[in-house]
Amino acid sequence: MTDRKELLVFENIYKHYPGVTALKGVSFTLHKGEIVALLGENGAGKSTLVKILCGVIPYGDYEGEIYKDGMPLRSAGTRDALKRGIAMIPQEINIQPDLTIAENIMLGSWPLKGIFIDVPRMNEMAKKAMEKLDLDIDVTQQARCVTSGIHQMMAIARALMSEPSVLILDEPTSALTNKETEALLKKLTDLRSEGICSLYITHKLDEVFKIADRSIVFRDGFLINQYEREKMDQGRIIQDIVGEKKEREYVHECHMTGDVRLSFRNFSIEHGYVRGKHILDDVSFDLYRGEILGIAGLLGSGRSELLRAAFGAIPKLSGELWMDGRKIAADDPAKAIEYGIGLLTEERGFDGYVKTMSVGENMSLVILKKLQEGLFLNRKKEIAIIEKFFRYIRIKAPSSSTPILSLSGGNQQKVLVAKWLMNDSKVLFLDEPTRGVDVGAREEIYNLMSDLTKNGASIIIVSSELPELVKVCDRFVILSGGTVSEIVDARENPVSEAELLAKINNAESEK
C-alpha cells in the first residue's frame, strides 16, 4: 500500500512564456512511496511543471508555491533541488561518450584519493549502482561502446546515487528494450517500498496501467483530471488527453508501385569501436516508389547505421546506392540532400536540430540553397514556406520564431519532420520518428507518411516499437548479425506483432 503521507504540495502554479501560458493554476499533492504518471499531449505543460520542480526553471520565474515536507521549495537551480532530494532523468540524457560508464555514472561526484580520482573505488561504486538495476556490465568500457538503452540505465543509476526522495523520469523507456523496460518498471516498484515518490512522464499507457498508483492528465496548461489506480480507464484518459478535437485516425493504405526508387547493393559497415568487426556485411535490398519499408531487428543489429551510411553521415566499407536506376555518390549529407534524401535521426538533441536557432530557422536549414538568389536569400519566400508547414504540421509554439529549445520533445520532432517535408524529399529515412511523441501527434505523423507515399515519396522507418512497424509498413527487412535474414511482404498477408517478433528472434537464434 502507498504511504499517504504528504511529500509535495503544488499550489496554484502559473508559468508564462512570451505569447503563451504553459501552466494555468495547477494544484495537486504527491505522497511518499507513490508512482504518479503525468499524461498529456506534447506541449500540455508536463515538462514545464517538472522543470519547475527540479530547479531548471528557478523560483521567481513562475507564480505559485511548492512545499516539500511542509517547507517551501524555492530552488535557485538544479543543485538546490537535488539537495532537497529531487532528481530528474531527462528525455535527452547527457552522456559523455569518451568517458567510461563508471565515470559517467559518478560524474561530478568522483571519489578522490588525495588529489586524484580513486578509480578502483569509482568502478566498484558504479558497478554496484548498475547491479541495483539488475545489470551486470563492464563499467570500465567507454560509454560510446554501449547502446542508447544502457545510456538510459546509466542516467537512472546516476540519479539514484543521490538517494532522492522524488525521482522524475521523462519518457524513460523510449530507448529501452522490452527486457530493460521490465527491469526499470520492477525497480520503480521496489523504490516505492523505500518511500521514494516517482513522477513518470510517458505516452505509453500500457506502462501506466502496470505501475502507476495515480495518473494526472494535463491539457493546454490545465490539470484536467486525476485518477486513482482502481478508477483508471484507458478510453477516458485518452479523451482527457486529446479533448474534443478529432484526429484523423490513421488507416494504412499501400501506395507502393513496381518502380524501384532506391537500391542498396552490398553495403558493409565497419563496427565503430571493435576493429576488424563489421556491424553490417553485404546488405542488399530494394525500396520501391510509394513504399513504407520497415527495418526490423534487435538493438545493435545495424538498423540506424544502415540509414546513416546511406545518408553519408558515417563511412561505409563497401556498397553502392542506386536511385531511380542510376548510381549515386551520396557519400556526405549535402550530396544526399541534393539527391532528395532526408534523414530524421534517432538522437534529435545531438544531431537533429541546432539548439541556438528558432523553430523556423531549423525548418529551413535544408532548403537554404534553393532559396538563394544571387548572393542573397529570398527571405520573403523562406518565411512563406516556413509558415505554411508550421501550420500544416500543427507545431505547438507561439510562432515560428520561438526558440526550438523551449518546445516539448514531441514538438521538436514535428519540426524535424517539417524540415524534410519542405525539401520535397524523394526518400525519407526515419529513425524512431515517434519517440517521445503523444498519441495525437503520432497519428499526425503516420498520416503525413501516408500522404507522402501517396504522392510518390518512399520511406524507410526504423522503430523499436513493433506495433508501430506492423501498423505502417508494407514490407519488412529483418537484420540479424549484420546481414539481411529475411524480407517479409505484408501487403497481401498482414504480419502481426507476435509474428514479426518471432521472425526477429528466429533470425538471432540461427546466427
Image (tube, rainbow, N blue to C red):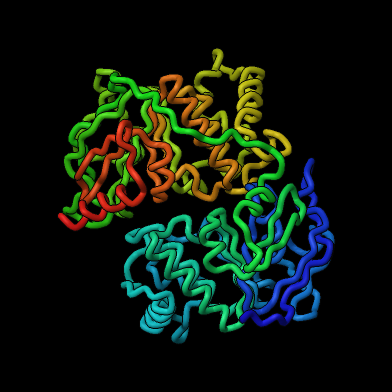
* Lateral position of residue 244 relative to residue 392, left or right: right
Residue under the point 42% across and 37% down: 472
**Residue extending furthest toward the top:** 374
Residue under the point 21% across and 48% down: 482
Rendered location of residue 400, percent (x, y)? 67, 33
* Lateral position of residue 406 relative to residue 114, left or right: right
Rendered location of residue 221, percent (x, y)? 75, 51
Quadrant (top left/top right/bottom left/bottom right) for the C terminus: bottom left
Rendered location of residue 74, percent (x, y)? 78, 70
Tally the numbered discs: 0
Question: Which residue is nearer to you in this view: 334 or 154?
Answer: 154
- Is residue 81 visible to us here? yes
Above or below, 434 relative to 151: above
Question: Which residue is nearer to you in this view: 92 or 393?
Answer: 393
Rendered location of residue 292, percent (x, y)? 38, 32
Question: Which residue is nearer to you in this view: 198 or 491?
Answer: 491
Above or below, 23 relative to 485: below
Quadrant (top left/top right/bottom left/bottom right) for the N terminus: bottom right
Residue under the point 63% across and 17% down: 381
Above or below, 32 relative to 420: below
Residue under the point 45% across and 19% down: 455
Give the quarter of the image for residue 273.
Answer: bottom left
Give the quarter of the image for residue 209.
Answer: bottom right
- Is residue 406 visible to us here? no
Above or below, 486 relative to 15: above
